[in-house]
Image (cartoon, grey):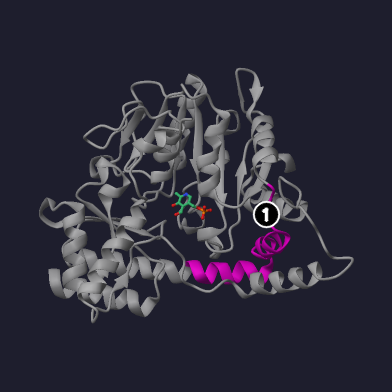
Amino acid sequence: MKINENFLKVPESYLFTDIGRRIAAYKQAHPEADIIRLGIGDITRPLPAACVEAMRLAAAEMGTEQGFRGYPPEYGQPFLIEKIREFDYAARGVQLDSDEIFISDGAKSDTGNIGDIFDRDNIVAVCDPVYPVYADTNAMAGRAGEPGPDGKWSRLIFLPCTADNDFLPELPEKRPDLIYLCFPNNPTGASISKAKLAEWVDYANTNGSVILFDAAYEAYITGDAPHSIYEIEGAKTCAVEFRSFSKTAGFTGVRCAYTVVPKQLTVQSVSLNKLWARRQATKFNGVSYVTQRAAEAVYSPEGRRQVAANIEYCRRNAAVIAGALREAGFRVWGAQDSPYIWMQTPGAMKSWDFFDLLLDKAHVAGTPGCGFGPGGEGYFRLTAFGEAGRTLEATERIKRIFS
Ligand code: PLP
């Protein structure tokens, strides 16, 4: 009997578990401390009323003879898929077929599970810093090789994202099979222009690579950055796209997302759409009816208004945080098209040291950049999801200490 030993290679706990532990330890030692958490990327605003009402109606429907539904369609309810097709894609000039959209319980699961349909020997490229799920799930699958002392995996290609390249990765020198891109980016908050993303699409099509494009934060885009990779010509033959209702509509606790796998996308003449459909039908039993009705309500006129108001709320927080940090003399990125504010620590301080300093002096908890990969060392992430008054209070404390 043997376990999957790759699991022994990944860090023992998830970044946010470590952060939670440190905050709990601090709280125990300083029970009077009023800690403001600007760390974890979780929504704090209540669900849009339109979604709550849709859930209430759907739950009532399920309690009737005629309205009861058992297992949902495994790839998603047609009523939701049609709304996605119309509002998220056709409205931006992208035509998708219904069977190219797969409703799921999260972009985290989908970005992690997508590896199932690719060979273990494929070479994977990830940005550095990166949303840890991409690297860790490939490590669990045995695709990342061995972890090095510098925090880098031996078989992963790390694409440096630094202040010098505005946190936009350069095309790799060595060809990867799979390329994870996330824009607007977690953790750096960087967004990518159409022209820059087109370079990646051309690269992938020329080199036979597949881009795994995570657009979980597209709703935060304010300028003309692409919301979908399919706004770029040629992307349907080289890219899978992941979207989520989590950060768009506050569904982090409700759980609903979707993945687009175009039928034109093939590897070794095999349709990835077919493989993903097979994978989902085998390992996933769909998203609840009540949840999908709630997601559908995101596209109603009231839903759209309420979602826009929540995002605007976060944007204001992001502007407050970024403004205060700049006033305090920090170098700051993100915040514009993203709920994340990415800052350089003062005096090249290590990320965890700054975490401890901020927690101790300001009672503000953020996220150490090094938790997102070695390239995040010396950086720190704050999030705009908090309550506005508390966010403002956190920034005043930071300004008092560092100005
Ligand atoms: N992708 C990125 C880049 C994220 O930052 C997150 C959550 O923080 C997710 C995916 C997870 O999305 P979901 O809640 O749909 O699983």
In this view, the residue farthest toward the top is: 268
User: Which amino acid type is marked by label 1?
Assistant: Val
Residue 339, percent across and down? Answer: 40, 60
Residue 264, percent across and down? Answer: 66, 28
Q: Which residues are magenta?
A: 285-311
The residue singled out by tag 1 in the image is 287
Relative to 156, residue 10 above or below? below
Residue at 53%, 59% (x, y): give it: 246
Q: Nearer the viewer, residue 42 or 3?
A: 3
- Which quadrant would residue 297 be assigned to in this image? bottom right
Residue at 32%, 32% (x, y): give it: 158
Q: Is residue 202 left or right of residue 344?
A: right
In this view, the residue farthest toward the right is: 66
Residue at 37%, 50% (x, y): give it: 14
- Which quadrant would residue 203 be assigned to in this image? top left
Is residue 347 visible to us here?
Answer: yes
Q: Is residue 189 magenta?
A: no
Q: Is residue 296 magenta?
A: yes
Q: Nearer the viewer, residue 5 or 183?
A: 5
Q: Residues within 10 Å of mark 1 (few under 14, many from 20)?
A: many
Q: Main secondary structure of the magenta part?
A: helix
Relative to 189, residue 299 above or below? below
Indicate the quadrant containing the C terminus: top left, top right, bottom left or bottom right: bottom left
Relative to 53, residue 139 above or below? above
Residue at 36%, 56% (x, y): give it: 16
Residue 19, percent across and down? Answer: 30, 59
* Label 1: element kind: loop
Residue 328, percent across and down? Answer: 17, 67
